[in-house]
Amino acid sequence: MNARDILDKLVAFPTVSRDSNLELVDWVEAYLADHGVTARRVWTEDRQKAALYANIGPEVEGGIVLSGHTDVVPVDGQDWDTDPFTVVEKDGKLYGRGTCDMKGFDAIALAAVPLALERRVKRPLQIALSYDEEIGCTGAPPMIDDMAGHLPRASAAIIGEPSMMQAVTGHKGTFGYWANFRGFEVHSSLMHRGVSAIMEAGRLIEWANRMNDENRTKPPSEIAAMFDPPWTTVHVGEIHGGTAHNITARDARVQIEVRAVPDETLESWDAALKSEIARIEAGMRAVHPDAGIALEPMFDVPGLQPEAEGRAEELVRRITGDNGSHVVSYGTEAGQFQERGYSAVICGPGDIAQAHQPNEYLTVAQFEAGQRFVTQVIDRLCA
Ligand SMILES: [Zn+2]
């Protein structure tokens, strides 16, 4: 099977993040087994999904990980001209959900398996396919932890998110919460005896505004300066609450998200947020002891730090000849590999602008560029 055959196969599994990916995983496992490669699964607790990884070649250190995710975003409400779960080639473009983000790269990595075996690589090719990337990169961490216990350590991890085959060496880290405010209801004419969840939530929003104002006036660090915008942002994306104009709101929910430049830690931002929550909550409790704020974690994805002389970056630059410095504003699994000690870089076919869109596509030219790239990765593993 060539990369295109594999892509057709992978896209045909409608692995939207909310659904199981096991049919795809079964297929990939069987494909690898046909080549004599034993893969290992890392299951979710409910066993509805699994990540899959494998070592191709000798069990020695110094290999290269090609990392992708198996899940795709939904097509609900999107106007597609073709069946999203069938690859349709037209005018040099491969249409289909996930062709760009990122089953194209997955297919290229899998198609390289027979080549790696045939060429008898001296250091292993490692393939790592996660789940639930699209809902907050929650599938990769247990997979990477499991790899550490079962595979010889690779010297570089290439995360094949669409980057137009450029070396992307940094992205912001991000985390988000639902902040659930519980107030105390009284008639609004006596609002001093009640706690308005809405008005208390407003204090948190005001904190977000203040942080943004402060952050944008600080001179950016060298790393921060690569980003647009070159500062950490605090955003409130949703707010719900209240029942009537004359009742202090009992409930309000606010969705708050921090996107931190990679040289500011998510831990310090998390601590800053929690201390503000504690401050607001103390004021609420002073009025009524049942009032308070419960934080519900939504996602937590570490940033990718540009590495000083990183091996992954160097490898990608040598192969692609790309010497520009690129960072992206979306989170990926690259930061999670890096956090666990891998030298990590993002490099994959396709343009992120086509990801998640109706009529998502990957150009044939990018698909082929990706295949040439992985062939050269295998050359390096033979050297
Ligand atoms: Zn992706």
Image: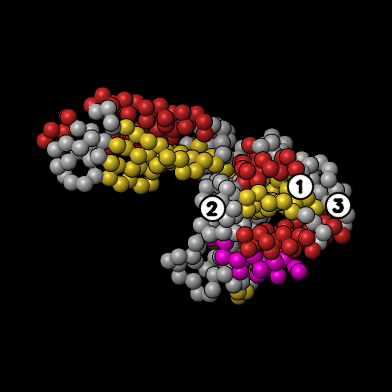
Q: Earlier in the sequence, mark 3 or mark 1?
A: 1
Crowding at label 2, few (<14), some or many (≥20) Cα neighbours within 10 Å? many
Residue 317: % across, % down: 73, 47
Residue of label 1 = 64
- Rendered residue at 49%/65% (across/down): 75
Q: In this view, does 355 lie to the left or right of 347?
A: left
| Mark closer to the observer (1, 2) | 2
Q: Is residue 284 magenta?
A: no
Q: Which amino acid does label 3 sit on?
A: Val
Q: Give the range drawn in magenta.
A: 1-16
Residue 43: % across, % down: 63, 50
- Rendered residue at 14%/38% (across/down): 187
The alpha-carbon separation of the residues under discs 3 and 1 comes to 11 Å
Specify whether tag 2 is near ligand 1 (CB below 8 Å): yes
Residue 255: % across, % down: 38, 43
Q: Is residue 353 left or right of residue 118?
A: left
- Rendered residue at 61%/57% (across/down): 70
Q: Which amino acid does label 2 sit on?
A: Glu
Name the element at disc 2. Answer: loop
Q: Residue 134 bears which disc, if any?
A: 2
Residue 329 visible to an observer of this rendering: yes
- Which quarter of the figure has residue 156? top right
Residue of label 3 = 121
Name the element at disc 3. Answer: loop
Q: What residue type is labelled 1?
A: Ile
Main SS type for the magenta part? helix
- Rendered residue at 47%/32% (across/down): 270
Name the element at disc 1. Answer: strand
